[in-house]
Structures are given as structure tokens and as C-alpha cells.
Image (cartoon, rainbow, N blue to C red):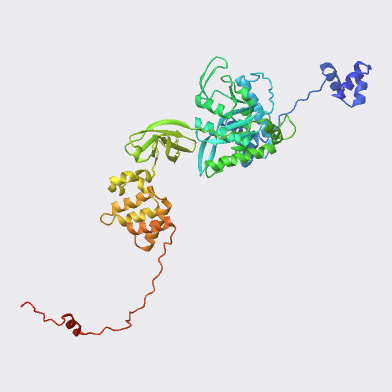
Amino acid sequence: MAFLSVIRRWHFRDGFSIREISRRTGLSRNTIRKYLRSDTVEPKFKVPERPSKIDPFAEKLSGWLKAESRKQRRTVKQIHADLVSLGFEGSYGRVAVFARRWKEDLQRQQNTTGRGVFVPLAFEPGEAFQFDWSEDWALIGGERVKLQAAHTKLCYSRAFVVRAYLLQTHEMLFDAHNHAFRVLGGVPRRGIYDNMRTAVDKVGRGKARQVNARFSAMASHFVFEPEFCNPAAGWEKGLVEKNVQDARHRLFQPIPHANSLEELNLWLEQRCQSLWEETSHGVEPGTIADAWRVETQFLMAVPRPFDGFVEHTKRVSPTCLIHLERNRYSVPASFANRPVSVRVYPDRIVVVAEGQTICEHLRIIDRHHGIGHTVYDWRHYLAVLQRKPGALRNGAPFADMPDGFRQLQSHLLSKPGGDREMVDILALVLHHDEQAVLAAVEMALQAGVPTKTHILNLLHRLVDGKSTAIAPVEAPQALVLGKEPQANVERYDTLRGDKEVRHAS
């Protein structure tokens, strides 16, 4: 560009001839005439088309970019690594340029470039947080599981928490807030949400919303004001929307492995906190962790966890079961054929009746099998056994009894009246600690005397704190009298006295 400027100045300002300029520059006169006639300020050169190392992989790369969903799309670094495994020898930059141009062409075809203009937002410390859900995948116990990830992000410090669940239900939403505020160290003044069904029952005009009663109870418990975005306006909570994209690449690609959902959530929590230290804030000086330490001073202290259950009224069947989400759970037999209240938590269900908790079960969430599961607690059927001892032989709930009880059952049921005796022994669980009864049964089995009387003896010794071991009795091999008795029949005559005794003839 500077060289062309010199040529133009020599000719138009200094009046040099083309021959003189050619002599000074070494260029041909035709080249100099072309530059002067074109009236160009910058020289343009035709770049010849040269083959690129990415050309043999262009079709495959375009297919990858087109086939992958938005939620599961790989990063350019991951795509470059996959191409290298297929024999690609080019650089990461070459793949990045190809992906960028492919995206620009796609936007041009869809006429989506320049769709909207937005105003950047700024928040004060402790002012607000944003919440959103996303769908991701993980390997849990060797099985690929679809997860619902709850994202909570502070608007000022940009500290974020991600927690995984199997469903997007009310109880999962409440549990996510309990853990998010615990990790973030406090509660901001406002919460920003989209119009999710677990929070909004009906969307009205403008900002009018009919908020779910349980969601309102949670907001009142944590003392924050919920705000909802306009329909289809996700950019109004752009911080957490961006966090969904970043977390997908940082946390769920490659797919994480865990033995259980609890183990995965513990890893997610620790990984998020480590990312606070590693990620620059972008607006405030330092990292996200530095800004978070400033914001915690403006957050309200976290109250006790919100009791975030969803309550259903169920009627107990004649077989002492309640039905929930295609699964069945046992209830104490005294509540059969009666209505009970079922409180559903993310990891358990609690059955309440007459103002008190009557039983509790681990919750089963199985979205892929429609048959359902049945969860028994054999203790719930002991009252029935008192009236129907024969049900012990083939009763389905008693298949889950401890091994000690099952061994005793196989021994007693082979004897007449053994079913009644076994029921009496199991009924001891209603009045004594189950482990103490089981210990007495195992001791009786080891001693080779598995009887009701012996088990009761051992149980009372265990309850009273006495030793169950019997002290050995040392006895001599033979007993020897110190004075041998003498036979004397005359002693009987002394009984007669001086009078003659007449005997009956």
C-alpha cells in the first residue's frame, strides 16, 4: 500500500514520467500504467485456490455440525480431536475457521443475522439471582441416564450452582433452591425465572402471573421476590442462559461417570466451586470467587431448609399398599382401606395419618419401565400374621426378612405349630429393638436350640444387660458318702412299744 502511494505521488504530484518511475522501481511500464489507470489506492492480488488439509474432511465435518443438536453439540476443540483420530493433520485454527464460516452460511440461509438488539444489564451485589433448567446426560451406575439440571446463578458475582435430578417437578425445584442457597451462602432479594409450569399456573397480560401456591410458599420462606420473564424472551435472564451453555461444555462433556445420583451431585457442587476460582469475572476485577466473596456480605442469611414436599391423598388397598407413579409402597396394616396423606420428596416418600408419620420409603423413579415396582416392609404385616399365621409361608413381604429370621423360619415351619411359634417370635419386633431380637435368634441358631422359649430367655438377658453365656458347672465323676448307712430291722420293733399289737387276720 505504501509503495503504490509513492508511485502515485511521483506521477501526479512530482510529474515523473512512466519511464522514469519504471527505472526507479524496477517495475515494467505496463504494470505502472495499470496501477495508475485503475485509480486504486490498495493493490489487489488474485489469490490462487490451493488445496487445504481439511478438504477431504469437509463433508464429514459439515455433517457433524448439522446433525448434532444444540444441547449436545461438541466444542470445536472436541471436533478437532475427533478429526485427528480420523487422520486429519491440520491445526485447530483451520477447523475453527471452517466451523465459523459454516455457521455464518447457516445464519445467512435462515435469515437470522441481526435478529435483535439488546441492552446490557448491571446488578448490585445481593440484588438478584437467575434460575433455569436444562437437559443433559450422565453415566450413573454404568447406565446412560437423561438428567434435568437445575442452574442457579447470582447476577452480580456470577457464582453458579448446578444440581442434577431425574424430573422437573415441584419437589425437585424446592430441593434445588435449598442446596443452591446453601452453597451460595445466602439469599438475594429477587429471583428471575421463566414461566415454568412448576412456578406459574397461568400467564396473564404483561407481567400478570398466577403463581403456584407451593412456589409462593417457598419464596415467602426464603424471603425473596420472584419475577418472571416475558413469554419466549429467554434473553431477559441471559446470565443463566449463558451458564447453561458453558456448564454443558465444562461439566457434561465428556459425559461424567458416577455410581449414584448423590455422588454425581457432590462432584457437580465441588466442580462448580473450583470453576469460581478458575474463571475470570469479566467485569469486576479478579475471578468469580473474588466477586462472590464481596457479594456474600449483601446476601440474607440462609434460613432452615424449606420443607419442599408435594402432598397427595391416597387410599390404602386391602393388601396394605398405596400407588404412586406406577409403583406400590406398603403401609402398616392398621391403616388398610383408609385414606392417608403421601408427602413426596425428591428421594423419599413419607406417609402421614392422624397427624403423625406412620412410615417412610425410598422413592423409586423409573421412567423407562411401565410395569412398576412394589416396595414391601415386612414389619407392616405383622398385625395380619397374628390372625393369619399361615400367610407366613408364601407371603411376598416376608421374602425380604433378614437372614437370621429366614433361617429360623425354615427350621420352625417344618414342625407342627411352627408357623404360630414363628409369628410370636416376629411379633417381638413390635415391642423390642429389632437388632436385639435378631441377635437373640442368631445366638439360638448357633447354640442349636432355635425355640421360642430359648429365644425369649436370650432376648431378656440382652435387654437386661446380663451375660448370655452359661457358666460351666464342675461336678465330680462319682459321689461318695462320708458315713455308710447300716441295715437294722430291729428298729421297726421299737415302733411297737410295750403293748401287743393285734393285726387283722
In the picture, measured across the screen, residue 38 lies left or right of residue 147, that is right
Res 106 visible: no
Q: Considering the image in quadrants, where does the N terminus appear?
A: top right
Res. 444 image quadrant: bottom left
Residue 67 screen position, x and y as percent: 56, 31
345 or 113: nearer the viewer = 345
**Looking at the rendering, in which quadrant would you find the C terminus?**
bottom left
- Along the viewing direction, whichever of 300 and 325 lies nearer the viewer: 300
- Whole-percent x, y for residue 129 in the image: 63, 28
Compared to residue 115, the image places residue 462 above or below, namely below
Taking the view exactly as shown, the residue that stands out farthest to the left is: 505
Quadrant of residue 29 within the rendered picture: top right
Q: Front-most of 91 and 164?
A: 164
- Nearest the viewer among 428 and 331 is 428
Question: In the drawing, does residue 394 fall left or right of residue 283?
Answer: left
Q: Where is residue 9? Give x, y as percent.
A: 90, 19
Left or right: where 141 falls relative to 381: right
Q: Is residue 92 visible?
A: yes
Residue lying furthest top: 205
Expressed as whole percent of the image width and height from the top left, the position of residue 322 reads 38, 36
Total numbered labels placed on residues in the image: 0
Q: From what the image shows, is residue 444 above or below residue 262?
A: below
Residue 341 drawn above or below residue 8: below
